[in-house]
Amino acid sequence: ACCSYRLRDALHPLWQSPLTIPGGTRQSPINIQWRDSVYDPFLKPLKISYDPTTCLHIWNNGYSFLVEFDDSTDRSIIVGGPLENQYRLKQFHFHWGAINDWGSEHTVDSKFYPAELHLVHWNAVEYPTFEEAVMEGNGLAVIGVFLKLGARHEGLQTLVDALPAVKHKDTVIEFDVFDPSCLLPSCPDYWTYAGSLTTPPLTESVTWIIKKKPIEVDEDQLEAFRMLLFTSDGEEEKRMVDNFRPLQPLMDRTVRSSFQ
Ligand SMILES: NS(=O)(=O)c1ccc(C(=O)NCc2ccccc2F)cc1
Ligand SMILES: [Zn+2]
């Protein structure tokens, strides 16, 4: 019974693959224990410059909905913070729950937020393609932003209005102009740690930059996320909710903060 319990526990329904990578030492997401994070005065401010016209389309990939960008040039980049190089924006997506009590991937002092935004960037200075960067320890940089229930977010609304068009898995809609910096909190404070992708292939290639302050969205906007489907048109409908990975062990890692 004990081993089957462990086996059942290790194979998460959403990913069908082991939840912890055998031998993984830097898996994500993690709980950020505020008091255990270490202020690093050498961390630089994160510099973000996105060109809204690099936006391409919104795509339901059966895990989340992604807003993808033209990453063939350095028009939308981040630099500074904990990063040695500049990193190119490739896509952003969200993770959310069936109800407001959970949904984020990272937690802060064991508190879940109802949703979490991930802005995915790759190191185009050192690697020729995203696919190669995904396999390297310093290949990716993902900015995580917590969403909390509150006022309606006008910038998010343009995205929410497009979601009915990507209700089913493998549907895509053109999305010409969008500036993702409108989804970032104004406060510059962040935590950073070395981690991994939170969906397969779970590679340990991500420098995580988690913003301390959440953005506010309203109930209708969260509900719009929850009307998306994991399933393709014609299949038995499964609502796209609870698309977050369980917390992973911190192991021998320190979370640094850019603030005191
Ligand atoms: N939730 S997250 O950690 O921010 C995350 C970010 C990006 C991916 C991704 O690009 N997967 C597809 C993929 C495509 C090509 C090569 C490798 C890949 F993982 C997965 C998870
Ligand atoms: Zn993600």
Image: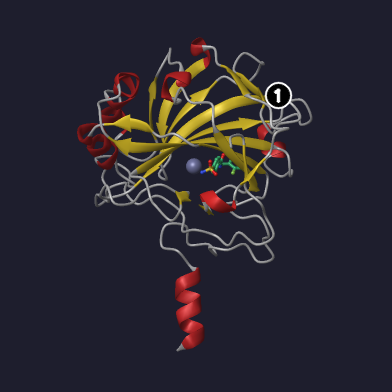
What residue sits 50% from the left and 78% below the top? 6
Instruction: Point out the image quarter for the N terminus.
Output: bottom left
Give the colour scheme of this rendering.
secondary structure
Residue 6's place in the image compared with 210, above or below, is below
In the image, is 200 to the left or to the right of 152? right
What residue sits 47% from the left and 57% below the top? 15
In the image, is 189 to the left or to the right of 59? right
Q: Amino acid at mark 1?
A: Gln
Which quadrant does ligand 1 occupy?
top right
In this rendering, does residue 199 appear at all?
no
In this rendering, does residue 113 appear at all?
yes
- The residue wearing badge 1 is 86
Residue at mark 1: C-beta within 8 A of ligand 1? no
Residue 221's place in the image compared with 32, above or below, is above
Q: Who is closer to the viewer here, 66 or 253?
A: 253
Quarter holding residue 140: top right
Q: Residue 44's spot in the image, x, y percent?
A: 68, 27
What residue sits 32% from the left and 31% below the top? 216
